[in-house]
Amino acid sequence: MILEIGIFMLGIGLLVYGAWLLVGGGSKVASVLGVPPVVVGLTVVAFGTSAPELFVSLVAALRGSTGLVLGNVIGSNVANLGLILATAAILRPVIVEKGLPKREVPLLLGATALFTFLVWDGELSRWDSLLLVLGFVAFMVMTLRSGHRESNQEEAGSSLPEGLDPEPPGHKLKQLFGGLGLVILGIVGLAGGGQLIVTSALDLALRLGVSETLIGLTLVAVGTSLPELATTIIAAWKNQDDLALGNIIGSNLFNILAVAGPVGLIHPLVQEGSQGRVQLLCMCLLTALVFVMIVFRGGKIGRGRGWVLALLYTGIMAAWMIQP
C-alpha cells in the first residue's frame, strides 16, 4: 500500500512539473504569435493543465481500464468547478471577462449536456467519440478566429513608441524555439507521470477492493487537477481573472471534447458500477450552477458563491466515497 501511494505521489509530481513546463512554453509561444490572454487561457493554458487527464486517460484506455477514464473526466470537471473555482473565489472574488458568458460558458453547458446524453447508457462508443472530436475542432476554430480578430484590433489601435527600436532579427524565433523546447519537455514529464499514476491507481483499486471508476472520480481526478488548481489560484491572485476563469472553462471543455473524444476513438469507454448516471448528473448540476452564476448573475464569482460551490463539491465527494 505504501509503495503504491509513493509511486502515485511521484507520478503526480511529474504531472505537475510537466504541466508547468507545458504551460510556460505554450504561453511563450502564444505571446510570440500575439494571441490575447483570454484565448491563451482557453486554449494553450487549458490544454496544458488538461494534459494530465489526457495522458492518464490514454494510458488507462490502452490498458483496457476504461472505467478509470470516464471517472477521471467526470471527477476532474467536478473538481475544476467545485474545488478549484471555489478556492479561487474564496481567496479573491473572480471577475468575469465580458465575452465569456456569451461564448464559452454556454458552450461548456452544451458540451456537458451532450456528453451526459452520450454516456447515459453507460458507454461512449467510437461514433459518440467522433462527435465529441468534431465538436472540439469546431470550438478551436471558433476560438482562434475570435482571438485573431481581437489581436488585429489591438494591433490597429497601437503603434511602436517613437525612438523605440523594434526587436532584433531572430529574437522572436529564439523565443519561439525556447517555448517549443519547454513544451516537448513538459510532454515527456506528463507521459511518465501518467504511466506511474495509472499503474499505482489500478494497484490501489485492487488492494482496496473498489472500482476503477471510483478511483478515477476521486484520487486520480483530484491529482490530475492540481495543475488547474495552481494555475487558477496564481492567475486570480495576480488579477488575471480572464486567464483564471478561461483556464477552468477551457479545461472542462478540453476534458470532454479533447480527452474523452480522442481516447474513446482509440478504445470505446464503458462506465463501471450502478452510479454512473448519478455521477453524470452531479457534473451537470455544478456546470449549470456556474452557468447561472456567470450568465444570469454575472459580474463576478464572489466568496459567497465560492463557498456554495465548495459545499456542493464536499457533498458530492462524500456521496461518491460511500457509494456501493
Image: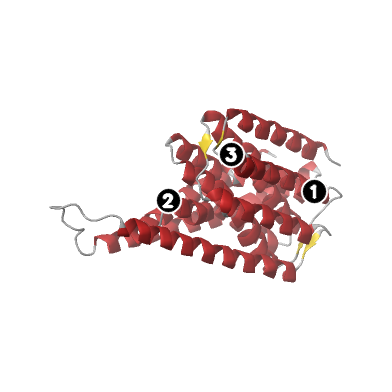
| Residue pictured at 45% horizontal, 51% vertical | 23
Q: Amino acid at mark 2?
A: Pro
Q: Secondary structure at mark 1?
A: loop
| Residue pictured at 81% horizontal, 54% vertical | 272
Compared across the picture, whether 211 is left or right of 255 comes to: right
Above or below 324: residue 131: below
The Cα atoms of the two marked residues, 1 and 2, are separated by: 40 Å
Give the percent coordinates (x, y) of residue 83.
Answer: 63, 37
The Cα atoms of the two marked residues, 3 and 1, are separated by: 28 Å
Asked which colour scheme the image uses, the reply is secondary structure
Which image quarter: residue 54? bottom right
Q: Amino acid at mark 3?
A: Leu
Q: Amino acid at mark 1?
A: Ser
Q: In terms of depth relative to the viewer, which is nearer, 10 or 145? A: 145
- Check whether the beta carbons of the residues at disc 3 and disc 2 lie within 8 A of each other: no
Residue under numbered circle 1: 211
Above or below 150: residue 280: above
The Cα atoms of the two marked residues, 3 and 2, are separated by: 18 Å
| Label 1 vs label 2, nearer the camera | 2
The crowding category of the residue bearing disc 3, from other C-alpha atoms within 10 Å (few below 14, some 14 to 19, many at least 20), is many
Kindly identify which numbered label has been placed on residue 229.
Answer: none
Res. 3 in view: no
Q: Secondary structure at mark 3?
A: helix
User: Counting residues from the N terminus, which is met first, the one under dot 3 or under dot 2?
Assistant: 2
**Residue located farthest toward the left when viewing the structure as drawn:** 163
Q: In terms of depth relative to the viewer, which is nearer, 312 or 55? A: 312
Give the percent coordinates (x, y) of residue 102.
Answer: 57, 52
Residue under numbered circle 3: 85
Residue under numbered circle 2: 37
| Residue pictured at 82% horizontal, 58% vertical | 122
Give the percent coordinates (x, y) of residue 274.
Answer: 87, 49
Quadrant where the C terminus is found in the figure: top right
